[in-house]
Image (tube, rainbow, N blue to C red):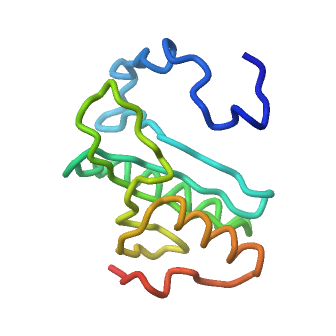
Amino acid sequence: MEYTNENRGVIQNRERARQLINFSGIKFGNITPTDVDGACDYKDKLTMFFEVKYGNAVPPPGQKLFYIRTADDIQKSGKSCIVYFCWHDIANPEDDIDGAKTEVKYIYFKGQWYTGSCELLEAVTKAITATNNKRKNQWQNYSTQ
């Protein structure tokens, strides 16, 4: 399938998307690879990572550490980086999850965790607006941890 503006962000190959990649053979002590549910670069100014969990799932400590270290390294380069931890309640694994409507509960930005609740699309829109307006912190309505 050719990529066009109409099909951007749409799963291009459902059969391949269902095919799981097993990294259990790559271990260095207690260090193993993690997956990233989504990533986006906005105009070489802002990098965003999206991690989506189901129900009451808790991100593994190693996955959180990966995102923290990666975000901090990107920040050191002079670019902004935001990590969104989102949740959904779609119980049937055959049903697609609308990522834009997942609930953001945790945001990691500039070395600080923020907690709150909004849809991912709203959070991303705030971040892009703030980037375009060169605002320092768009998470005033979120509480810090």
Residue 31: x percent and y percent? 35, 38
Q: Residue pushed farthest bottom?
A: 140
Q: Please indicate whether residue 86 sits to the left or right of residue 38 in the image.
A: left
The N terminus: image quadrant: top right
Task: State whether residue 52 is above or below residue 128.
Answer: above
Q: Position of residue 125 (x, y in %)?
A: 62, 66
Choose top left, top right, bottom left or bottom right for residue 117. Answer: bottom left
In front: 92, or 79?
92
User: At 45% from the left edge and 50% from the top edge, which residue is drawn?
Assistant: 66
Q: Is residue 139 above or below residue 74?
A: below
The total of numbered circles placed on residues is: 0
- Is 87 situated left or right of 18 in this image? left
Residue visible at 29% across and 50% down?
Answer: 59
Q: Residue at x 50, y 80 (%)?
A: 139
User: x%, y% of residue 84?
Assistant: 46, 59
Quarter of the rendering containing residue 44:
bottom right
Quadrant of the image occupied by residue 92: top left
